[in-house]
Amino acid sequence: QVQLQESGPGLVKPSETLSLTCTVSGYSISSGFYWGWIRQPPGKGLEWIGNIHHSGSTSYNPSLESRVTISVDTSKNQFSLKLSSVTAADTAVYFCAAYTGSYRPFDYWGQGSLVTVSS
Amino acid sequence: EIVMTQSPAILSVSPGERATLSCRASQSVSSNLAWYQQKRGQAPRLLIYGASTRATRIPARFSGSGSGTEFTLTISSLQSEDFAVYYCQQYNNWPLYTFGQGTKLEI
């Protein structure tokens, strides 16, 4: 059973960089799958942020691409999200998720981590 | 970018009734369409993929249909635990994904 758990600061100051980590259990990242981040502002819908393959290849939402970096650490079985130059509009619950192959929806989700951008 | 539009935004139904939710894509996504259910304070749960295939352990009262640009999620005989927000998602433009804005199913 693949399980994902987000971790990171719950409060980030405007203009700084938001950093979150997703720890995977029950599956080795280096074995395959694709790993992604999705966010949900309070009371709003889901926004896909980006994905990474265990090989390191990435894809990003064009609207966020200039500020987003997703990376993977196979030695720790983790993958990470960095979002730079944050504003209050980046306040959201951030979910990490996974899908099993190309042209697949997200099969597995973490419980989500609320990140608030405020001074 | 493929834009996904869901309707209605809010759907009021009674337990035991049938609910029909719609999702429209701005261009064809073939059958690469998924539906998720999200309850308050929880992560989304995959219900349907491939437009019509139920995910693991999803009850048979959930069914999906459609292809191309028009899709429907039907929940027959609503149970109390089905009241939630439902999202469609296209993955035809893989690896770029987009979600619809959601339909809230309420009593």
Image (cartoon, coloured by chain):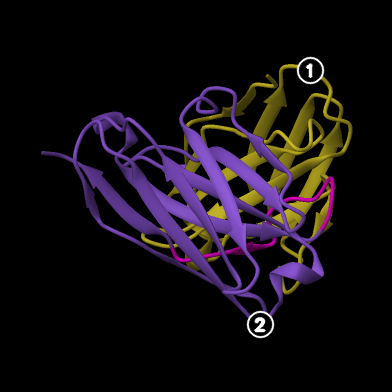
Chain colours: A purple, B yellow
Residue A116, magenta (yes or no): no
Distance between the alpha carbons at the discs numbered 1 and 2: 37 Å
Q: Position of residue B61 (x, y in %)?
A: 72, 62
Answer with left or right where residue B92 lies relative to residue A46: right
Query: On what subunit does the disc labeled 2 rest?
Result: A
Q: Which mark is residue A26?
A: 2
Q: How many numbered marks, from 0 up?
A: 2
- Provide residue A36's location: percent of width, then percent of height: 61, 51
User: Of A99 and A14, which appears nearest the observer?
Assistant: A14
- Tag 1, which secondary structure? loop
The kind of secondary structure element at disc 2 is loop
Q: Nearer the viewer, residue B105 or A33?
A: A33
- Which of the 4 image quadrants contains residue B25? top right
**Residue depicted at x 70% and y 21%:** B2
Which residue corresponds to mark 1?
B27
User: Which span of residues is magenta-colored?
Assistant: A101-111
Residues marked 1 and 2 touching at CB (< 8 Å): no
Which residue is at a point 83% across and 40% down the rendered structure image? Answer: B32
Q: Does A104 lie within the magenta span? A: yes
Q: Position of residue A3 (x, y in %)?
A: 59, 75
The kind of secondary structure the magenta stretch mainly shows is: loop
State which quadrant residue A32 falls in: bottom right
Q: Give the left or right position of residue A58, taking residue B99 as reference.
A: right
Residue A105 sits above or below residue A119 on the image: below
Q: Is residue B5 visible?
A: yes
For badge 1, the amino acid type reads Gln
Q: Is residue B102 above or below residue A95?
A: above
Q: Farthest residue in the front direction?
A: A75
Residue at the spot 83% in from the left edge and 55% down from the top edge = A101
